[in-house]
Structure formats: C-alpha cells, structure tokens
Image (cartoon, rainbow, N blue to C red):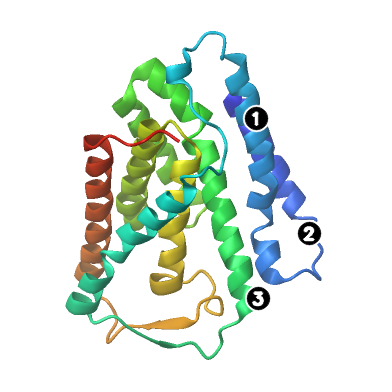
C-alpha cells in the first residue's frame, strides 16, 4: 500500500511540476517536483504509521517529523563528514578554488532550497516508513541491502548518475543514512545529515548550478580514471567510517 501510494505521489509531483509557469526562475522550476512530493510523502508516512500504532510498541516506532531539535547537529555532522575529504583532495589531487564571477545569490538560494527538499524527499521515500517496515520484516542488514539497491537504481535513472558513482558513493550513502535512521528512530536525522553532506558537496566539489556557488572549483589537470576512482573510494570510506561510528556508539533518540 505504501509503495502504491508513494508511486502515485511521485507521479503527481512530476506531473504537477510540469505546470510550473515558465516565467518562474529556472532554479525554482528545476526543483518543483520535490517541493510537491515532500508534503504528499509526509502525509502518507504519518497515515501509514498511525495504522500500526496499536500493534507496535512505542519503543519500536519512529518519529516521522522532518525537523526536530537535533536537526542542526546532524546537519553539521553531514557537512563535517564530507569536509574530512577536502584536505586529501587538495593535497593528493591538487584541487583549488577561486572566486566565481558568475555567482548569483538568487540562484544559490533556490538551489540550496532544492537540495534540502530533495534530501527530504529521498529520505521520506527510502528511509521512512518503507525502510522501517522492512527492518521489522527482514532485519536490519537485509533491509539495508534492498533499500541501497533501490537507491542506486533511482540515481542511475532519475538522478542521471554514472554507474561508478552510483555503485560506490550512492550505496555507501544509503547505508549511512539507514544506520542513522535506525539508531535515532527519527526521520529528521537522516534528512539533516543528507542535507549537510549535499550542500557542502554542491558548494565545494560538485556544483549543481555553476552560478549557485561563490567558489569555482579548479583542477590542475583532467582527473584520470584512477584518480576519479580514488576520489570515490575516499568518499565511500568516509561514509563507511561514519556508519561504523553510528552503529558503534549510542545515539540519543530524537
């Protein structure tokens, strides 16, 4: 039932986004579908969770609120995790930054808003009710494997990712966000963590819109396949280390 209504909500969001007026800023039109999907997904998540409250002990439920008091902390954790890769990228691969002459504050605001809503949409879809239900039915790691596989497929198709980034970075990210969800029993924590990672990635490493970041990334030379693979491996290693830390240490529930 959740999958059926979730797909319907996604299709409604995609179709609805097609009717956004062309006179609106391109950055807002580009992110219209997550803005439409998030409220629909939240309503569906809350409704499905309420159906089972009488059958599930309170200790096994999760908090469906997308924002809690701990969101700021998890946002900083997400940004800090990605930040650990920056010194290595600078020292080993020669990454440098300079001022961006085409920078637009409006474009950055719209893009950052889109990043927040996209992270929320992905976590509602992949780490919300469906993941919680799979954990109860199959166990933690089988649920992680299934959701990671679906997460990879979504990024290969809808996200337009290349195969290697999807198999390495996306899979590792899915496992990290799933671990945070399971340990905190909160939807807000993985949303905030995901958002912090993606915003810093956009601003420093992989701008979604070249005019939406004040810094322009510069490589001393075109990255070779080996260097590119090394960068992805480092990102995955950081995510795996973060997952191990989350599962190893007790995390306060939101």
Binning the other alpha carbons within 10 Å of mark 3 as few (below 14), some (14 to 19) or many (20 upward) gives: few
Residue at 65 percent across and 24 percent down: it is 47
Q: Where residue 148 sits in the image (x, y, percent)?
A: 37, 39
Q: Dot 2: what SS? A: loop
Q: Dot 1: what SS? A: helix
Residue at 47 percent across and 55 percent down: it is 195
State which tag comes first along the sequence, 3 or 1.
1
Dot 3 corresponds to which residue? Answer: 106
Q: From the viewer's perspective, tell me whether residue 246 is left or right of residue 7.
A: left
Residue 156 appears in the figure: no
User: Which mark's residue is nearer the viewer, 2 or 3?
Assistant: 3
Residue 51 occupies quadrant: top right
Q: Which part of the image, by quadrant, shows the C terminus?
A: top left
State which tag comes first along the sequence, 2 or 3.
2
- Up the image or down, 223 lies above or below 172; here it is below
- Up the image or down, 134 lies above or below 7; here it is above
Residue at 24 percent across and 78 percent down: it is 90
Q: Nearer the viewer, residue 221 or 109?
A: 109
Mark 2 and mark 1 in contact? Answer it, CB < 8 Å.
Answer: no
Binning the other alpha carbons within 10 Å of mark 1 as few (below 14), some (14 to 19) or many (20 upward) gives: some
Mark 3 and mark 1 in contact? Answer it, CB < 8 Å.
Answer: no
Residue 18 occupies quadrant: bottom right
Rounded to the nearest angstrom, the CA distance separating label 2 from label 3 is 18 Å
Q: From the viewer's perspective, tell me whether residue 47 is left or right of residue 71.
A: right
Q: Which part of the image, by quadrant, shows the N terminus?
A: top right
User: Which mark's residue is nearer the viewer, 2 or 1?
Assistant: 1
Dot 2 corresponds to which residue? Answer: 20
Q: From the viewer's perspective, tell me whether residue 30 is left or right of residue 92.
A: right
Dot 1 corresponds to which residue? Answer: 44
Q: Where residue 248 sits in the image (x, y, percent)?
A: 21, 36
Q: Where residue 112 sits in the image (x, y, percent)?
A: 56, 64
């Amino acid at each position: 039932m959740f999958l059926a209504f979730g797909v319907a909500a996604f299709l409604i969001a995609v179709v609805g986004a097609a009717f956004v007026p062309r006179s609106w800023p391109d950055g807002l039109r580009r992110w219209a579908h997550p803005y439409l999907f998030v409220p629909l997904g939240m309503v569906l998540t809350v409704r499905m969770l309420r159906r089972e409250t009488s059958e599930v002990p309170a200790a096994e439920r999760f908090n469906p609120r997308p924002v809690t008091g701990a969101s700021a902390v998890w946002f900083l954790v997400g940004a800090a995790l990605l930040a650990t890769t920056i010194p290595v990228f600078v020292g080993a691969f020669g990454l440098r930054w300079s001022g961006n002459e085409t920078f637009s504050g409006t474009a950055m605001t719209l893009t950052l808003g889109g990043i927040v809503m996209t992270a929320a949409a992905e976590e509602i879809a992949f780490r919300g009710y469906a993941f919680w239900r799979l954990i109860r039915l199959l166990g933690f790691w089988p649920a992680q494997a299934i959701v990671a596989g679906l997460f990879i497929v979504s990024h290969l198709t809808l996200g337009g990712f290349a195969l290697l980034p999807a198999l390495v970075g996306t899979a590792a990210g899915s496992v990290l966000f799933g671990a945070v969800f399971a340990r905190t029993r909160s939807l807000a924590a993985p949303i905030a963590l995901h958002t912090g990672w993606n915003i810093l990635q956009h601003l420093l490493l992989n701008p979604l819109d070249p005019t939406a970041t004040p810094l322009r990334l510069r490589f001393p030379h075109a990255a070779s396949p080996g260097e590119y693979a090394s960068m992805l491996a480092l990102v995955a290693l950081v995510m795996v280390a973060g997952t191990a830390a989350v599962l190893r240490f007790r995390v306060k529930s939101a």
